[in-house]
Amino acid sequence: MKLFFLFLVGLGLLQFNQYAQKRAQENPGQEKEALFVRPEINHPIIGENYLGLQWISWDKFGTTVVKRNGEGDLEIQGKQELRGDFIKIEGLVEIINQDEFIVKGKITTKVDHINSDVCTREGNLHFKKTQGKKYYRLQDKKNPCHNVTDYIDIFVKNS
């Protein structure tokens, strides 16, 4: 039994090493950008959670789903929609620690009473949970298309 356990531990370390090597090859020179967690360790953001933009509603949240794709990367997809206004999020997730993660992707919003145009922000979107809160908030709150502040939050369902 002990030998079987050691085999499983070794297999897990081998998988983690392969995962870390793949990430280092994809991001040369950026190895210290994020702490790569072992693929089998859960982070609160993994799974289904709630998505909210204050301009749309604080009462009727949308949802996000974070799961591993075929390459082992974490992907996020999410949407909140009400009366034609919406926020959508999509991209790859890199975990920094239990309180922070980065979405390498895009967030698209449309809020009629601000401006009926669609607004998109793309790149490294940094989310952080602070002061014992139960949500992760996008740190760059400045709307890139209009002179307003967006509070884009992902609320953890099971916290």
Image: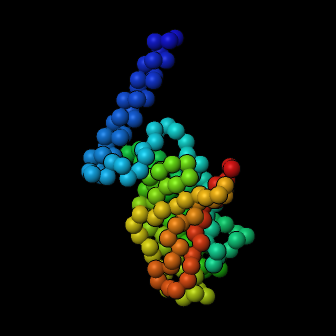
Could you tell me which residue is drawn at 55 percent across and 83 percent down?
Answer: 148
Q: Is residue 152 visible?
A: yes
Between 147 and 107, the residue placed more toward the observer is 147
Between 142 and 120, the residue placed more toward the observer is 142
Check the image and report above or below for 94 versus 16: below
Left or right of 75 on screen, residue 21:
left
Left or right of 106 on screen, residue 63:
right
Check the image and report above or below for 115 versus 18: below
Could you tell me which residue is drawn at 52 percent across and 86 percent down?
Answer: 147
Left or right of 98 on screen, residue 92:
left
**Total number of numbered labels?**
0
Left or right of 84 on screen, residue 121:
left
User: Which residue is the extreme one toward the front?
Assistant: 131
* The quarter of the displayed image where residue 124 is located: bottom left
* The quarter of the displayed image where residue 42 is located: top right
Task: Please provide percent x and percent y for residue 35.
Answer: 43, 46
Task: Please provide percent x and percent y for residue 101.
Answer: 49, 55
Task: Please provide percent x and percent y for residue 46.
Answer: 55, 49
Could you tell me which residue is drawn at 44 percent across and 52 percent down?
Answer: 94
